Image: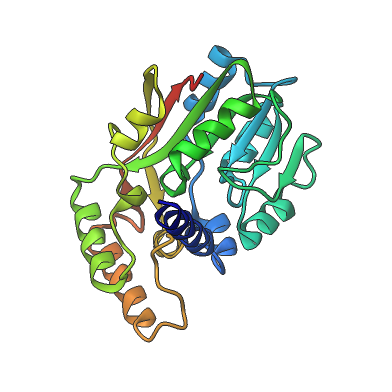
Amino acid sequence: MRTKTGSLSQERRVLALDNISKFTGKGGVYQQYRPDYAADALLYLKEQLGIGPGAAVADVGSGTGIFTRQLLLLGAIVFAVEPNPDMRMEAERQLAAFPGFHSIAGRDSGTTLPDQSVNLVSAAQAFHWFEPAAFRQECRRILKPNGKVLLVWNQRDHSSPVNQVSKAVFAEYCPDFKGFSGGMSQRDARIENFFPNGYELLQFAYPIYYSREGYIGRCLSASYAILPDNPRYEAFVAALGQVFEQFQQDGKLLLSNTTVFHLGSVH
């Protein structure tokens, strides 16, 4: 039993390190081309949860700080917890001027934050990389009484023609592609199991228009996108350009998008 448990723990450590490294070398393109989240979604946090001046948030898996910035603009104190050095340093470059910004070299299972120190734990476009049980335990530790956990995604309309064609391109060129948002669905079992007492599902329409450069850049920022040193990289970029030309109107490509909140307690 010890050998099996030890082997499983080692496998999890290897997987965790592999997940962390997926965004190495992508900090700049991620920051430049990834969209932020619907303004109405942030307004909900302000009006319904009181996320503003005086509120403390742990934004776990914060990446280059896209959601972190929006929380800071509400006036919150934000502890941006990110394990990947490239992504974390990009956030530090972008957000250093905010007095409420605190950059933390940590991860889902170990934020390094004190017990009962935050009002909200958020994970934007990140939960599908986590080990859910370890993350839930860490949330319970750092949340203040009555604090909540917020899982956030920008989700595409998977049925739209442009996303169907884009998906085919990723499947052709990107061996690590397993589906958008890590294959996570709105009612994914990983989410259902994470919240023992249920959760609120909130959706905020947020259509996004891309230029050719913006669309290709957004695609290249994905964890599964191949890097420039891959021999198929130029063909991959050319295929993305063809997708843009197929669906653009007046130089802009519309991607139907919804900011989705999963909000609940883990106590």
Quarter of image, res 57: top right
On screen, 37 above or below 27?
above
On screen, 226 above or below 139?
below
Instruction: From the top left corner, tell me how far across and down residue 229 is, in percent.
Output: 46, 83
Instruction: From the top left corner, tell me how far across and down residue 81 is, in percent.
Output: 64, 44
Instruction: From the top left corner, tell me how far across and down residue 48 is, in percent.
Output: 53, 13
Q: Residue at x 57, y 15 (%)?
A: 49
Scheme of colours in the image: rainbow
On screen, 103 above or below 118?
below
Instruction: From the top left corner, tell me how far across and down residue 46 is, in percent.
Output: 59, 19
Total numbered labels: 0
Q: Residue at x 51, y 39 (%)?
A: 134
Q: Residue at x 40, y 55 (%)?
A: 4
Foreground: 1 or 205?
1
Report the residue that reaches farthest toward the front.
1
Quarter of image, res 234: bottom left
On screen, 122 above or below 222?
above
